[in-house]
Amino acid sequence: MILSLYLGGCPPSLTISARKIKEVIEVLHRRANVDTSFIVNHPLVLLSSVENSLKPRIEIFNQLKSKNLLRRKTSLATICKLPEMKLIKRYAVSYSAQLGEVSFPLRAHSL
């Protein structure tokens, strides 16, 4: 109650269940090979849907990185922060020939 009086509500990262935090951390460790400092530096990644947002973004990032298609110093944090449609247009559509079929179950149909 006191926290909400001072902050105008609870910070979003404090409203996430322990199960969700654990799931996001496991996916980031397993699929993206990032350490805990990434999560500490980018806590909003904890709000991402694992199946609908995080896994497809990690897949796109890993494929682009493995094929040396990333321009500049594009990081996983950049990929995670981009709005979905901008991410799809900038990477999935632009590099569709090199990436092949990328599973992005969100609103990809609205392109």
Image (cartoon, rainbow, N blue to C red):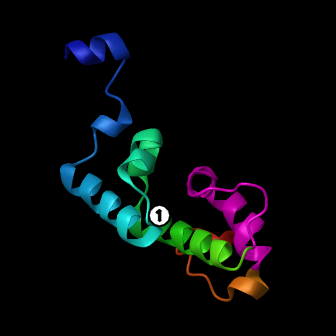
Q: Is residue 8 left or right of residue 69?
A: left
Look at the image and tell me whether residue 106 can be seen. no
The image position of residue 79, as x and y in percent, is: 61, 58
Task: Where is residue 69? Give x, y as percent.
Answer: 75, 72
Question: What residue is drawn where x is 78% and y is 56%?
Answer: 72
- Mark 1 secondary-structure assignment: helix
Name the residue at 28% across, 45% down.
16
Indicate the quadrant where residue 10 lies.
top left
Magenta extent: 69-95
Number of numbered discs: 1
Asked if 99 appears above or below 62 in the picture, the reply is below
Q: In the rendered view of the protein, which quadrant contains the N terminus?
A: top left
Identify the amino acid type marked 1: Leu
Quarter placement of the C terminus = bottom right
Q: Residues within 10 Å of mark 1 (few under 14, many from 20)?
A: many
Task: Find residue 49 and report its image quarter.
Answer: bottom left
Please name the residue shown 46% across and 40% down the image. 41
Percent x, y for residue 63? 62, 78
Residue appearing at x 59%, y 50% in the figure: 81
Q: Is residue 24 visible?
A: yes
- Circle 1 residue: 54
Q: Can you say whether 79 is above or below 39 in the image? A: below
Viewer-proximal residue, 49 or 44? 44
